[in-house]
Image: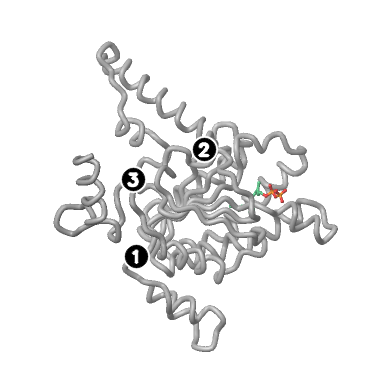
Amino acid sequence: MKALLDAVQPGDKDWELAQSIDPARLPAHIAIIMDGNGRWAGRRRLPRVAGHQAGIGPVRSTVETCARLGVKVLTLYAFSVENWKRPRTEVETLWRLLRYYLKQELPELQKNDIRLQAIGRLDALPPQVRRELDAGVEATSANRGLLVNLAINYGGRAEIVDAVNAILDMARLDGSISSLKIDEDSIATSLYTASCPDPDLLIRTSGEMRISNFLLWQIAYAELYVTETLWPDFTRADLLQAVLEYQKRDRRYGGLSGAGRRPADGGSSADENLIEALRSS
Ligand code: FPP
């Protein structure tokens, strides 16, 4: 958080936003559906791939801001299992941009102690992309600052299927298959994100109210934040705004909020009056 305050000066447009953030209530894990690249390009009469190219800047600035804020994990949805349906040239451009990003940003990631991880069905990636991705993951593996998960050829349902199959394979190997029982814990620890806390905040750009097969298991209690901003226009201020909105939320996890509870026993006196009225009716 201090690193963020070091990066903004009094008078900067992000100064007040940065000052308003409560460092004690930061989301540990932010996940982002980076949407709207195509529309951004369309509005400028540019080809769709120009929108993806313009999406690199916000990736860079979001990684930097999360690191400065002290967020522990950032997960970015870069390519879904369904994105293969797009024209071949668009898919190839996305691979080129990913390789460009890895090459350009590696020194900066190292300098800032940022660790890369890739999540998804990575075996299906073009071999050269896979090699460069693995090299980036390996090169940053000892870093201990922000963890950036790049979701590539990722699908939430595919991830759950892969987790269950991994559990079955393990049980076959160690001979425990006949007594195998699957529970929430065994699934959670077999997901691609096993080492990460669940996302606290899920951001989607471009105004669409959809989850699009992203982190289906992990977002059970994530706070959702949808902004109309298209991904290529997403700035540090947009990210800080999302964090501030998150800090206003009352996270109840199916329980009661502080306001609705009487400190002594967890119920309000209005509740008790109603219960008494029902009892005597
Ligand atoms: C969705 O916008 C965006 C994508 C499918 C790709 C996201 C890729 C980047 C931001 C660049 C590369 C990323 C990294 C991590 C280096 P869309 O094309 O669906 O937009 P639309 O809904 O307006 O058509």
What amino acid is found at the position of numbered circle 1 in the picture?
Arg
Q: In the image, 84: left or right of 146?
A: right
Q: Residue furthest bottom?
A: 11
Residue at which label 2 appears = 120
Label 1 or label 3, whichever comes before in sequence order: 1
To which quarter of the image does residue 247 belong? bottom left
Residue at which label 3 appears = 254
Label 1 or label 2, whichever comes before in sequence order: 1
Q: Which mark is residue 25?
A: 1
Does 178 appear above or below 258?
Answer: above
Q: In the image, 139: left or right of 127?
A: left
Q: Residue at x 82, y 61 (%)?
A: 44
Q: Give the distance between the C-alpha atoms of the residues marked 1 and 2, in whole angstroms.
A: 30 Å
**Quarter of the image where the N terminus is located:** bottom left
What amino acid is found at the position of numbered circle 2 in the picture?
Gly
**Quarter of the image where the C terminus is located:** top left
- SS class, disc 2: loop
